Image: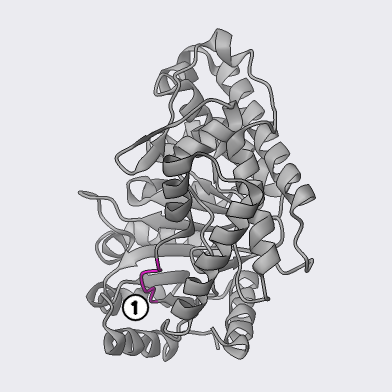
Amino acid sequence: MKRKRLQENLARQRAFLDGGQPGQLLIFTPKPQPCSLMTRCNQLIRDEGFPGKNEVRSLVGKYLQDFRRWQEHCYPDDQVPIVPVHFDIGVQTAAMTNLEPRFHGGHWWLEPNLSWEAIEQLSITMDSPWIQLLLDINQALWAHWNQDFFFLPFLHRSPLDAANGIRGTALFTDMYDRPEQVKALVQWCVRCQLAIEDHIHYYAPSPEPGWGNGHMGVWLPQRAVWVNGDPVTMISARMMREFEQPYTGELFSRTGGGFFHNHTKGLFQVAEVAQTPGIILQQFTRDPNCPTVQETLLSDPEMRSVILEASLQTPVYISGMRPEELHAVLPLLQEGRFILEVDCGGHGELALDTIERVRSVRGLG
């Protein structure tokens, strides 16, 4: 991406995040990236074991050559260039517990289903090889950086989701049977996540304070975090307020704010998530056999009001829209504040038309 367009998109996104007026919309029309950095790391780990710093530096440099070539051919939408630094939730659990994940079906997985006795023995340590690998990747990215991309140092599970990864699905009945132990584990997860953040930022600091972070096309403030908030799809709003919101709110408030990932099965929590302390935006991925955000806006007047009101408090990022869906719901979207990720299937003319259509009606430059 040319420097001038990057600066324009960055200014537009900052204005969007600072705003709160109906009709503020961002439009993303993503193109598939080249073979991801994490895919390349996975292949190296599986073939040769954990790479050393020099191997990571070389791998990142080769990836960025491809990434920069790809950026030159992206559509002129509102995204900023993002290098995704993300393995799988199994790696996130491994980094927190220093246990070993397994590679299965193309993904790293780890759900140790620890007993409460074992959970009480957990300690916060930075000795995990996964933390070292992610630190090496951060250092390599900054070494090759030329003020032309953003990334997140570490992608987190929400504290409740991290606790679910450690304890397993028994956690959901433990909320009723052992509520204080659940809260203690979730609080431990917050402390562990903050320790990981501090460790990476201490040893791989940004060379330009204020440059910020980024994920999924979005610029985020310095030290902001992203969390996988899937458990809120499985619990009530009351349980969310008791077991999830205060802990994620602490993580967000003690960093640079937070990006909350959710699914449309959890759309009923949109107003609760919007009230999380320190939240910057919330995002919804479409689920099979569940109404999408756009379908709900069109068909459910009561939820429409809830979603629009929540979006004015905290912007709502809708992933995986189709152009025909966007066109149908666009008049309603102008009543709120949304990031619209529209899959144009690699069709350049359709992407350009979609970008122009949104820009012609939004209340943002």
Which one is nearer the viewer's eye here, 111 or 221?
111
**Vertical order, 315 against 235 (above or below):** below
Q: Decide: is 310 above or below 229.
A: below
Q: Which residues are magenta?
A: 29-34
Q: Specify the quadrant of the image occupied by residue 73.
A: bottom left
Q: Residue at x 66, y 43 (%)?
A: 251
Residue closer to the observer: 307 or 135? 135
The x, y position of residue 269, in whole percent, is 44, 46
Q: Is residue 359 visible?
A: yes
Place of residue 285 in the rendered image (x, y in percent of width and height, measured from the top left): 36, 55
At 44% from the left and 74% from the top, the residue drawn is: 335
Magenta segment's dominant SS is loop
Assess whether residue 342 is covered by the magenta stretch: no
Q: Horizontal and vertical percent for residue 78?
A: 50, 80
Residue carrying label 1? 330
Residue drawn at 58 percent across, 60 percent down: 58
Residue 327 pos. (x, y %): 28, 80
